[in-house]
Amino acid sequence: MINNNYHNFMNHYYEYSTAIGRDPFNSYHAHHQMEILFIHRGKGRFILNQEITDFQSGMLIIIQPFQLHGVKVNSDTYERTRLHFEPSFFHQYIRALASLDQYYQFLWKQFLSRQWLILSGDYIPRLFQQLHIDLKAAGNESEQFDILGVFLIMLLQHVKTRYSQEYFANYRHKQRAYHHAEKITNWIEQNYMNRFSMSELSKSLHLTPKHISFLFRQATGSSITEYIIARRMREACHLLANTSESIETIAYKIGYSSSSHFGSVFKNYVRFTPLQFRQKTALTFETPKATEINGAIRSS
């Protein structure tokens, strides 16, 4: 059972929600916003940057724009708070604080070998609880933006005090429990732009196709085909938002033999045609004022 205590999609600039129970948004997805995911309680796995990691209570996960990710929940006691926000828009609240601004831009734009941390104590849960209260009481959009801006400053300062940039940049992990599934995602990363061949994947991993499918679903909760589609859609959204390449060119680049097939898959996944998505994200990045657009990639 899901209890969305508060959910707001403020004209694209941010989305905030809390949930108790099994989160319905556990499929692979990506979006052009940053995301902060805080696990209040529960167990499961999150998939991010071709890595599969067990999560636990008190974990804060930082997801950068256009990163493909997903959550597999293993517990009925799962409770999380999720915040998506447009990093360029909320930069206005942080840029006057030089040291914090540098940290913010590092988390936003630089390569992070670790994107999660375990927070002890009740400061962060109380901070999210107060955010929930303040957003519900806010009278207008401007006030809501200010509340989010102050929240981000307090959260980032708390994290920065305890975790340096080196903490996120120099992470090295040991042999992982889900290394077979991660090998599959790494293979997909190198080959998603081509026609998928289970036999080629099987040869690469020296495992039977049936065993590969079983291992991947066991680790992630979804099929390899679903992951490939999500990876292609992530790349399509990135190219549509950040390049002027034609839709036909983008379709071929990510493994589709025709632009019409690509357009059909894209609309089903993103809820917009490729052209509509390009137009909406162009508005997003060009203007700092609120507009009535919903540029999110599905279920993010």
Image (cartoon, rainbow, N blue to C red):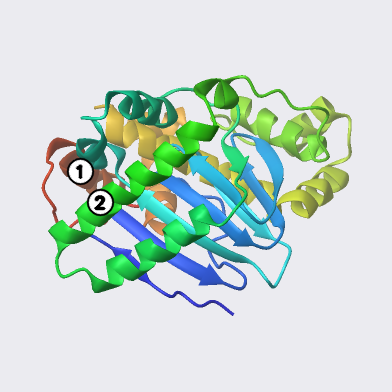
Q: Residue at x 61, y 54 (%)?
A: 71
Task: Kindly state the secondary structure of the residue where label 2 is placed.
Answer: loop
Residue under circle 1?
284
Q: Is residue 241 above or below residue 165?
A: below
Dots 1 and 2: beta carbons under 8 Å?
Answer: no
Task: From the top left corner, tell me how far across and down residue 296 is, in percent.
Answer: 34, 52
Q: Residue at x 71, y 23 (%)?
A: 172
Task: From the top left corner, tell me how far across and down residue 274 is, in percent.
Answer: 30, 45
Tell me the amino acid under the disc marked 2: Tyr
Numbered-mark total: 2
Image quarter of residue 299: bottom left
Of 196 and 177, the residue lying toward us:
177
Report the side of 144 relative to 107 (left or right).
left
- The answer to whether residue 257 of the structure is visible from this angle is no
- The answer to whether residue 83 of the structure is visible from this angle is yes
Of 50 and 268, the residue lying toward us:
50
Residue under circle 2?
13
Tell me the amino acid under the disc marked 1: Thr
Q: Classify the position of the C terminus by image quarter.
A: bottom left
Q: Residue at x 41, y 54 (%)?
A: 83
Q: Is residue 224 above or below residue 27?
A: above
Of 130 and 281, the residue lying toward us:
130
**Residue 40 numbered mark, or none:** none
Task: From the top left corner, tell me how far across and down residue 18 is, in percent.
Answer: 47, 67
Task: Kindly state the secondary structure of the residue where label 1 is placed.
Answer: helix
